[in-house]
Image (cartoon, rainbow, N blue to C red):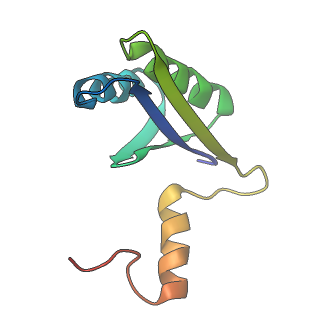
Amino acid sequence: MTVIALLSVAPVIEDSMASEVAKAVDALEEYNVTYETNPMGTVIEADEIGELFAAAQAAHEAVDGDRVSTVLKIDDKRGREQSADQKVDAVEAALGRPAHSDE
């Protein structure tokens, strides 16, 4: 997989957004993407940019509300294959430790 993106979709509301964000994440299931949700968004990987855009659009449209905020940041490595896990592994190798703090 060479197309990696960070997707953040949320309604602009004062209350909890969890149920609406869950709808956005669930919409990704219909596409040929892998994903992992974290506190700030969802990392998506796809073989093709079109599939990634379609999944992001479906996630955006799945959220109910008068106003929806969506941020999509794409890393499209066209010259070589690299997964999101490999990117994290490279940072951890440079650090010499896991890329997170011990709680």
Percent coordinates x, y for residue 66 in the rendering? 42, 9
Q: Is residue 3 left or right of residue 100?
A: right
Toward which corner of the image does residue 16 lie, by quadrant? top left
Rendered residue at 49%/86% (across/down): 95
Percent coordinates x, y for residue 81 in the rendering? 66, 56
- In this rendering, is residue 47 above or below 95? above
Rendered residue at 41%/75% (across/down): 99
Rendered residue at 49%/68% (across/down): 88
Of 37 and 70, which appears nearest the observer? 70
Percent coordinates x, y for residue 103 in the rendering? 20, 76
Q: Is residue 88 left or right of residue 39?
A: right
Q: Is residue 12 left or right of residue 83?
A: left
Of 100 and 64, which appears nearest the observer? 64
Farthest residue, direction front = 14
- In this rendering, is residue 75 above or below 93? above
- In this rendering, is residue 63 above or below 48? above
Farthest residue, direction bottom = 96
Rendered residue at 37%/25% (across/down): 24
Of 29 and 72, which appears nearest the observer? 72
